[in-house]
């Protein structure tokens, strides 16, 4: 998949769909180069920083369907690539016994494509998201190398199937385990971190146009303080920042205050241990002081 647009046009298209990028985070530049080079993108970073959103945004900008494979421990190639339609095959076997007519039961007619094969067989450009690849084992990762390097897969009963239209492949990783050099070598690398206060303010203003500027800044600054100064078990994600801001907006708030910080803190901190840590080491008054405009 290649696109007939400049980098500037590409950045404008991302902005038009409400996806905020900055020059220093290199998201737009890396994605643009990966598309033009027809190479997969490996998006790495801590949970909740918007890695999956990269694939969703690219799907919108490219007007290409998003095909998603959610990885998990124990995922194998049959669940990710294809399965045979055994019921249809058994029915055909019964018919063959009656008609004495043999037919190949391992043809495309009896194939049930799963996400990886769907991405290769799609006649139009698509975005193939392989989400949280680090949750799988090294054997599954090795299986992916043919697809990532040559945009093809081999099915024992049918042979090699090559992509009719190369999909844009986006892999994400939370860094739970080290990925192989072979996988990294086939991909363009992109590290995504928690957004800066300025970027998160832009996200809040874009997603919640009714949010006043002062509150948008206070919310983004407060979340930034929590991420930076507390050793939280689960750092608040961008989506949780949006939830918090939306809740304050629903309640008619125009600025933060200690009472509403305490009342809505559970929208940001999702474990009792993190809540206790907040009150032990910071508290609502100090958080408000640090988040003041």
Image (cartoon, rainbow, N blue to C red):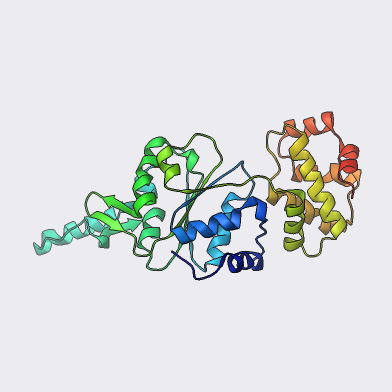
Tell me which residue sits at (79%, 54%) in the image: 245
One can see residue 81 in this view:
no
Q: Is residue 105 above or below residue 231?
A: below
Q: Tell me residue 141's x, y (percent).
A: 40, 41
Which residue appears farthest toward the bottom when viewing the image? 4
**Left or right relative to 11: residue 155:** left
Which residue appears farthest toward the top when viewing the image? 280
Q: Is residue 267 above or below residue 121?
A: above
Which one is nearer the viewer's eye here, 166 or 186? 186
Tell me which residue sits at (59%, 43%) in the image: 45
Which residue appears farthest toward the left when viewing the image? 100
Q: Tell me which corner region of the image, top left, top right, bottom left or bottom right, holds residue 161.
A: bottom left
One can see residue 140 in this view:
yes
Tell me which residue sits at (66%, 55%) in the image: 23
**Left or right relative to 217: residue 9:** left
Tell me which residue sits at (89%, 47%) in the image: 292
Which one is nearer the viewer's eye here, 130 or 246? 130
Q: Tell me residue 88's x, y (percent).
A: 26, 58
Q: Tell me which corner region of the image, top left, top right, bottom left or bottom right, holds residue 18.
A: bottom right
**Left or right relative to 256: residue 115:** left
Which one is nearer the viewer's eye here, 262 or 147? 147
Q: Tell me residue 1's x, y (percent).
A: 43, 64
């Amino acid at each position: 998949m290649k696109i007939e647009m400049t980098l500037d046009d590409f950045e404008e298209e991302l902005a038009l769909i409400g996806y905020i990028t900055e020059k220093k985070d290199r998201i737009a530049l890396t994605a643009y180069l990966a598309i033009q080079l027809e190479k997969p993108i490996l998006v790495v970073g801590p949970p909740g920083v918007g890695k999956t959103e990269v694939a969703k945004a690219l799907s919108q900008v490219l007007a290409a369907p998003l095909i998603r494979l959610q990885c998990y421990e124990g995922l194998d190639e049959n669940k990710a690539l294809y399965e045979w339609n055994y019921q249809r095959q058994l029915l055909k076997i019964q018919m063959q016994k009656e008609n004495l007519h043999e037919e190949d039961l391992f043809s495309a007619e009896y194939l049930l494509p799963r996400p990886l094969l769907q991405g290769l067989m799609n006649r139009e450009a698509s975005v193939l998201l392989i989400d949280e690849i680090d949750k799988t084992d090294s054997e599954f990762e090795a299986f992916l190398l043919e697809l990532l390097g040559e945009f093809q897969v081999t099915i024992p009963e049918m042979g090699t199937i090559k992509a009719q239209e190369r999909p844009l492949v986006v892999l994400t990783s939370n860094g739970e385990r080290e990925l192989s050099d072979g996988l990294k070598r086939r991909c363009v690398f992109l590290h995504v971190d928690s957004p800066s206060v300025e970027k998160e303010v832009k996200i809040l203003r874009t997603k919640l146009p009714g949010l006043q500027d002062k509150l948008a800044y206070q919310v983004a600054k407060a979340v930034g303080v929590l991420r930076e100064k507390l050793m939280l078990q689960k750092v608040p994600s961008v989506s949780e920042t949006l939830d918090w801001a939306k809740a304050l907006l629903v309640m008619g708030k125009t600025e933060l205050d200690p009472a509403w910080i305490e009342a809505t803190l559970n929208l940001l901190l999702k474990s009792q241990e993190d809540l206790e840590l907040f009150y032990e080491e910071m508290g609502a008054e100090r958080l408000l002081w640090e988040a003041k405009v």
